[in-house]
Image (cartoon, rainbow, N blue to C red):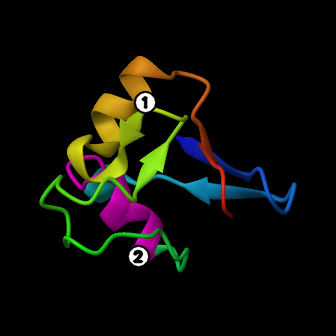
Amino acid sequence: MQITLKGKASQKEFQLLVEPKHLDMSLLDFLRAQGFPVASSCSGAEVCRKCIIQNEILSCAVSVSDFLKEYPDGIVVIDYL
């Protein structure tokens, strides 16, 4: 499985390999573990709303598995990246 991370600001794309051990992680934790600086000041408590992807989803509130079910193309878009 794979996730494609797209930065709107930079117009860059990154291909990220998703292994079975990643599926239960929040998308926020997965992206950070891959070295991407996803904004969040509440440490995943779903309060600050800084980790928004796709213009509406809190990356701390969705698992990698659930994201891939909802978005089978695996494309994650972050405005400020």
Please name the amino acid that badge 1 sits on. Answer: Leu
Query: Residue at left 20%, top 72%?
Result: 43
Is label 2 in a helix, a strand or a loop? helix
Q: Position of residue 37 (x, y in %)?
A: 52, 77
Q: Please state which of residues 55 and 32 is positioned toward the viewer in this rendering.
A: 55
Q: Quadrant of residue 21?
A: bottom left
Please name the amino acid that badge 2 sits on. Answer: Ala
- Most extreme residue toward the right is 11
Q: Please state which of residues 47 and 58 is positioned toward the viewer in this rendering.
A: 47
Q: Quadrant of residue 56?
A: top left
**Which residue is tagged 2?**
33
Q: How far is mark 1 from mark 2, CA to CA?
A: 17 Å
**Which mark, by number, is residue 46?**
none
- Most extreme residue toward the front is 48
Q: Are marks 1 and 2 in contact (CB under 8 Å)?
A: no
Of the 4 image quadrants, the one containing the C terminus is: bottom right
Q: How many marks?
A: 2
Q: Position of residue 69 (x, y in %)?
A: 38, 21
Tell me which segment is drawn in magenta: 23-33
- Most extreme residue toward the left is 45
On whether residue 61 falls in the magenta region, the answer is no
In this rendering, is residue 56 above or below 20?
above
In this rendering, is residue 10 above or below 5?
below
Q: Quadrant of residue 73?
A: top right
Mark 2 surroundings within 10 Å by alpha-carbon count, few (fewer than 14), some (14 through 19), many (20 or more)? few
33 with respect to 21 (left or right): right
Q: Position of residue 64 (x, y in %)?
A: 34, 44
**Which residue is tagged 1?**
68
